[in-house]
Image: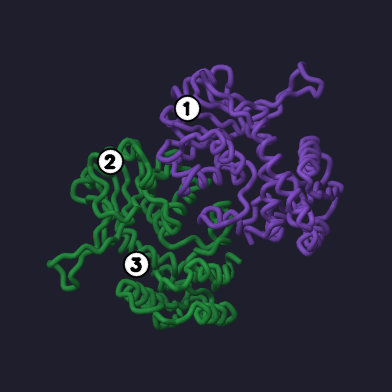
Chain colours: A purple, B green
Amino acid sequence: MYKIIDGKAISEQVKTEIAAEVKAMVAAGKRAPHLAVIIVGHDGGSETYVAHKVKSCEQVGFKSSKLAFEADITEDALLHEIDKLNKDPELDGFIVQLPIPKHISEQKVIEAIDFRKDVDGFHPVNVGRMSIGLPCYVSATPSGILELLKRYNIPTAGKNCVVIGRSNIVGKPVASLMMQKGYPGDATVTVCHSRSHNLKEICLAADIIIAALGKPEFLTADMVKEGATIIDVGTTRVPTSDTKSGYRLCGDVKFDEVAPKCAYITPVPGGVGPMTIVSLLKNTLLAAKGEIY
Amino acid sequence: MYKIIDGKAISEQVKTEIAAEVKAMVAAGKRAPHLAVIIVGHDGGSETYVAHKVKSCEQVGFKSSKLAFEADITEDALLHEIDKLNKDPELDGFIVQLPIPKHISEQKVIEAIDFRKDVDGFHPVNVGRMSIGLPCYVSATPSGILELLKRYNIPTAGKNCVVIGRSNIVGKPVASLMMQKGYPGDATVTVCHSRSHNLKEICLAADIIIAALGKPEFLTADMVKEGATIIDVGTTRVPTSDTKSGYRLCGDVKFDEVAPKCAYITPVPGGVGPMTIVSLLKNTLLAAKGEIY
């Protein structure tokens, strides 16, 4: 019988641990960690995510600030706001919720953030340090995935780990982490993507599959070997008449048919999703404690 | 019949191209590119490498400077020298020849180099930018390997590329490059290492194997499929009575038995080796032209 990796439960557990640390910090006379979130425009998904992030800050006792700008803010004006946050000594970390409007360069924005406050871990300095194996802010989704593997004691050393998708925010960094020395890590890592020829064959040899390509129900039972661990990073909004919102979140894995073959599997929602915010909180706590830089 | 990938010939060809560009630059009234090399102590291998680098600079019309320090130089003193080079407007790029004595932190040295002059591509900013796919200085060996694949028109898109070894200077960066969009790239990349369980099986499925683990003659014929392309990054000095120096360079591939199964294979010496210096020259040229930063 397969085991569900309960990201929701683990995320609550980690939040409780963080809250305890914050309480101790404050009791010791320090100020609480402070995270700021910049949001540009009114993308529905982004507004929901940001609301979740702000709420999670409250839950663990962080101070949070939300800076909302209209979609027509200029690139210069946004960079100026970022610069103000870089210089704010009362702020430990901040993120710019992506995506941002097309007239603003995402890369410029990412590089404008002081890497010491880049709790999203998207700045080249953090990406590079992660690759080399130096202390850094690891981006939220990869970090959340590793936390799940760790909390469930899933063996990774020498295992075949297949990552489907080569995005800068999930595929590449999680591959990089899974091949690092230590646990979770030491895996033999294969990165597949849209150009890969023999995906099915490669997946069938995998002990761990991390599906992060953003194609609903892409991974089917015939691609998975008995006893594999499946991490589903997909969160595509699929229209449905079954929910009040008019959509449901759909993963990259055809859960109903894949799950029976697995040792462990993450559901969508309630798997990787809840862990990403927790990773952001952890990075902010590290920032407040000055443990990375 | 297998084809030898002639790194020596290709490196001469690239040097000729660089020399032509330098000639044109100088004819246009610009100063020649200028590379500096710091060497600490008297490691025999390092002294040979540095001599090669200086000589290659001469060949292509670069200005070069060699700064040699005794092995007992303090970390502070070395960092101070690095800072001077960072600030020298007449210098385009520089490297610190590794290894350096144990009392000096290699990582501190690497991070002390201004990333805009880091033509070795070891600084976290360059590593991170490479991973993300942004313009950067790509480190010499990975860059040399891709150049060889390109000059021989070896197909990479959708191919299974197995990298053996996960070092920061070869394994990880070459894996990162081979999975990038474009050519050479778009490969399905697997990174194996000392903890991998089923190395033979994985290698047998590979269209391209990049052996970079530093174990003489590790890759044997039974691990290679017919028609594969083999890139041998190994350069271990093995004692022998056959040469005046008392050693010979030995690759990670058992050449005599592997070659007959291959479509393409690099020899050692004369394969990847000569390309690394060429990559360094290319980075320095890019620096002089201000094309990256």
Q: Position of residue B240 (x, y in %)?
A: 15, 65
Relative to A6, is A22 above or below?
below
Q: Residue at x 77, y 35 (%)?
A: A45
Residue for badge 2: B224
Relative to B58, is B183 above or below?
above
Q: Position of residue B32 (x, y in %)?
A: 50, 79
Residue for badge 1: A228
Residue sitting nearer the eye, B207 or B249: B249
Q: Which label lies toward us, 3 or 1?
A: 1
Say which amino acid is labelled 1.
Ala
How many marks the image carries: the answer is 3
* Mark 1: secondary structure: strand
| Residue, far front | A27
Quarter of the image that includes the C terminus of chain A = bottom right
Q: Which residue is drawn at 33% across and 75% down?
A: B43
Q: How far apart are marks 3 and 1 (CA)?
A: 49 Å
